[in-house]
Image (cartoon, rainbow, N blue to C red):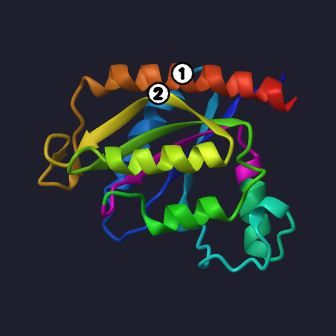
């Protein structure tokens, strides 16, 4: 049986974004684990246009080379950690667009959520949970939420409180267990 592969998807491409530091922190903690291999997938490296496929992604008949490449990348993984800021009580448009470009590649896999914002990004995660359910992604209950006021110096320098380490461990434990369970379903 192959090693579990989990993508840490950085869902913001905004200039000066805080998300890179958050995603790097997640990957740093994940790299110390032995239950799965984690890889950063930064949407800034995947400049997808606004949805331009003529058929719904659920049909699996991708036309664009960018879509085929993105779908192949998503298909590589058994599970996902979505790292997202909260924009206007939701997720960034670039993250929603990237999610919408694929369908079957997400199905029957597991997801966890890491968010940040003025109230920890929790409203963005609530939207992501609904999206994940529609994509047949099981999502774990443990989540990491970072406040711009207490986990960032001057709202921009990421300095998470120590208690987040224990939450991260719980998140990884749940995600790896569900990722393994979903792989047996797919097999």
Find disc 2 in the rendering and name its residue. Answer: 141
Nearest to the observer: residue 82 or residue 56: 56
| Location of residue 70 (image quadrant) | bottom right
Which residue occupies the foreground of this view, 4 or 140?
A: 140
Q: Is residue 174 above or below residue 133?
A: above
Please give the residue where the numbered disc 1 appears in the rendered image: 174
Crowdedness near tag 2: few (<14), some (14–19) or many (≥20) residues, C-alpha within 10 Å: few
Determine if the magenta segment contains residue 87. Answer: yes
Above or below residue 16? Residue 73 is: above
Mark 2 or mark 1: whose residue is earlier in sequence: 2
Which quadrant would residue 79 be assigned to in this image? Answer: top right
> In the rendering, at what x and y percent does residue 179 appear?
67, 28
What percent of the width, then of the height, locates residue 142?
43, 26
Residue 63 image position (x, y, % from top left): 83, 76
Local secondary structure at mark 1: helix
Side (left or right) of 1 relative to 67: right
Hey, which quadrant is residue 87 in on the image? bottom left
Q: Are marks 2 and 1 in contact (CB under 8 Å)?
A: yes
**Magenta part of the protein: which range?**
74-88
* Nearest the eye: 175 or 69: 175
């Amino acid at each position: 049986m192959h090693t579990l592969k989990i993508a840490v998807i950085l869902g913001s491409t905004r200039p000066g974004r805080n998300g890179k530091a958050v995603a790097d922190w997640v990957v740093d903690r994940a790299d110390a684990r032995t239950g799965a291999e984690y890889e950063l997938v930064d949407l800034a490296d995947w400049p997808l246009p606004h949805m331009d496929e003529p058929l719904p992604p659920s049909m699996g008949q991708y036309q664009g080379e960018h879509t085929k490449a993105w779908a192949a990348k998503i298909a590589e993984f058994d599970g996902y950690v979505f790292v997202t800021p909260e924009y206007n009580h939701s997720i960034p448009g670039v993250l929603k667009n990237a999610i919408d470009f694929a369908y079957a590649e997400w199905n029957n896999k597991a997801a966890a959520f890491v968010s940040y914002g003025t109230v920890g990004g929790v409203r963005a995660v609530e939207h992501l949970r609904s999206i994940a359910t529609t994509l047949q992604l099981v999502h774990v209950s443990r989540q990491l939420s970072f406040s711009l006021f207490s986990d960032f110096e001057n709202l921009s320098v990421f300095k998470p409180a120590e208690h987040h380490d224990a939450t991260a461990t719980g998140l990884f434990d749940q995600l790896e267990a569900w990722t393994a369970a979903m792989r047996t379903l797919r097999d």
